[in-house]
Image (cartoon, rainbow, N blue to C red):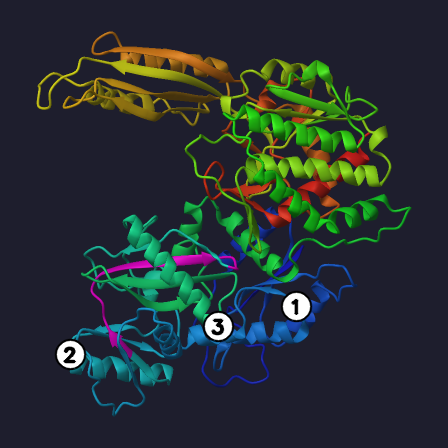
Amino acid sequence: MKVAVVYNRDSRNVINLFGTPNREKIGLAAIKRITDGLKAGGHQVTSLEADKDLIDRLEEFMPRVVKGERPGLVLNLSYGIQGQARYTHVPSILEMVGIPYVGSGPLAHSIALDKVVTKMILVQHGLPTPGFAVLESPEFEVPDLEYPLIVKPKNEAVSFGIKVCHDEAELREASQVIFDKFGQEVLVERFIEGREVNVGLLGNGPPQTLPPVELVFGSDGPTVYSYEDKTGRSGRKIELRCPAPLDEAMTERAQSIALKAFQAVGCADCARVDMRIDEQGELSILEINSLPSLGPRGSYVRAAEEIGLDFAGLVNRLVEVAAARYFGTPKPTVSASSDDPQGALSAFVTSRRDRIERRLKHWVSLPSRTGDPVGLQLAGQDLGKTLVDLGLREVPEFSDGRSALMWESRAGFRDGTLMVSHLDVPLGETSPFQAFRREPEWLFGEGIGTSRAPLVSIEFALRALRHLRVLAKRKVGVLVVLDEGRDAQDSAPRVRDAMASAGRVLVLRPSGTGNQVITGRRGQRKFRLVVEGEPVWPGRAKRQPLVWFAEKLREIDALTSKSARRSVSVSELRTEAFPMLLPHRLTGSLLVTYADPDRANEAEAAVRKILGKKGPKWTLAPISDRPPLARTKRGRELARELGAAASAWDIPLNEEDSSWPSVAGLAPESVPVACGLGPVSRDLYTPHEAVQRLSVIQRTLLLAQFLLQSS
């Protein structure tokens, strides 16, 4: 997609300079960081100053589109040049000329920039905000508010002009500075001595609330976030703690208040809500930032990092959520004539969005967790009927009905493309079931990212090929495993043999938000660890297994080595104890991820040495060993072929490695493998698992395009 980053830095390219000037500036380094991040996401990017020539430059960069073609989009960072409600100027221009953009509309920006109007709306919606008054002139009457008070210009941002006042003299002095320097009314409100937290929001309908960030001011200077602090000129460092050290109830309340404020003001795509927590633990909204800073020292960027979005991921997500708000899912970019198979493929897939989502809903409703053999059998029958109806046939050689199922086209799959996914949902029996639900940008449901969306992408890619009457001629196989939740222990021999017979292997593990294709994965060894001592009464001097192991755990964790591309960790710890006695047994899992088996052997030997011969009895028994996927020249070539197919639809596809194992590691090195080709997903293996709606269509198109052009 074409993305124009529109900003204001120090423009004088206007007809006349008069009125209230903009004092907010954005640095060239910040603009370059944003444009580089968008380019990394596969976008065609330019950056433009928001002045009187903006429309001409935009029209040159993203000319009027024909029906069915997606227009370009503006990433709006504009603070305005001069005048009132300056945040609204560029959005108003863009709406007038019909260019979509990232961020809130003129009305929300106007409200958020006017702090008094914002507070009136917050009060109207029953949202907490400090008591306040408006000073209209230097001859004001002192408001009936308890000191300390804080004063701010009514229509400014980034903490311009703020000051804490402890008596009338300070109040009049600080207010006079604002009247003189900013030429506007003064907002005075009760200053809350307490902790300050920011909650960012990302997306729409409703937006995702990011983890709260606490601003820790330390003992040096006032406990307010000044303009000098934000621009790195104060000489002190404000620590950003994320997630903020709040209990679960306070975190949920802060996020709930931020969401309601976002909706009350009418923001879109992104915002940041700043709050204070007083000594009684009550939250109060200070202000709503409808144009949150993307600076490296900002709390919005820090909160995004906490949910796994690096800076490039964040700016690309902003473009994605705005695109979803305007366009929903992709539209065909080319015609669908009989001599245009690519256009016909696009028309077929994009015209079946509703059907694809209904199929996803159907799959989510089918229970097939790893420990549910009946559910897995029924799900396998459902998938088998679908694929047979499409003209595929079962391959008994690689199907046993319990751990693996496989089908192939009439042309067979040998020396062709083998698509691999899994049918089981790797969740335990006690995990709550998540029904299917739809949001503007995300689809939710049990196993929707790990299992269901990849299966649906495979199905509709094959349907598209059948529609073009080429499926029977393509060498294509579909292999699903039923024991992913048991590390594919039973299916591994069949998977390995099937992959060895293929010409190339595509593993539809879910993609991350960076739109990755994985060409290298670490392996993983899992061990069962049992530590057992003697039951003792509380207070006995004899060392307990739990205490003993806690000391060993630090040494075990130290075996993790970035340079050795190895991690060693302990999980699923459980204790056993008799009534009134301290725990005498400790059980858990030891996980070793590795790129080189020798490094894994070293780690296992080191763990055994750490546990030693003294102390409680222990056992360390291997459970599973998932081999790594080594990066090979043929694998990278396959990734480039997939990238070429993706480019037909402007789908970003970034080659990466992963620390997590998959069945891709079972392929011999002579067979090219690409993994992570399932749709973009988040919150995997949790009750909040979701798949990106746009990505389901994109990955289906990618698969269909790749199979179409493959021999």
Looking at the rendered image, the quarter that the C terminus falls into is: top right
Task: Measure how far apart labels 2 and 1 are at the Cα level.
Answer: 50 Å
Magenta stretch secondary structure, dominant: strand
Identify the residue under disc 1: 99
Is residue 681 or residue 395 the one in the foreground?
A: 395
Dots 3, 2 in contact, CB < 8 A: no
Q: Which residues are magenta?
A: 188-205
Q: Is residue 586 above or below residue 151?
A: above
Q: Position of residue 31 (x, y in %)?
A: 53, 58
- Callout 3 environment at 10 Å: few (<14), some (14 to 19), or many (20+)? many
Query: What residue is shown at x 77% (from left), y 34% (from top)?
Result: 707
Which one is in front in this view, the residue at disc 3 or the one at disc 2? Answer: 3
Q: Amino acid at mark 3?
A: His
Disc 3: which residue: 109
Magenta span contains residue 190 = yes
Mark 1 surroundings: few (<14), some (14-19) or many (≥20) residues within 10 A: some
Amino acid at the residue labelled 1: Ile
Specify whether 393 is left or right of 137. right
Separation of residues labelled 3 and 1 (CA atoms): 17 Å
The N terminus: image quadrant: bottom right
| Residue 186 rendering spot, x and y as whole percentages | 32, 82
Name the secondary structure under disc 3. Answer: helix
Q: Earlier in the sequence, mark 3 or mark 1?
A: 1
The residue under label 2 is 167
Distance, label 3 to label 2, CA atoms, is 33 Å
Element under label 2? loop
Q: Residues within 10 Å of mark 2 (few under 14, many from 20)?
A: few
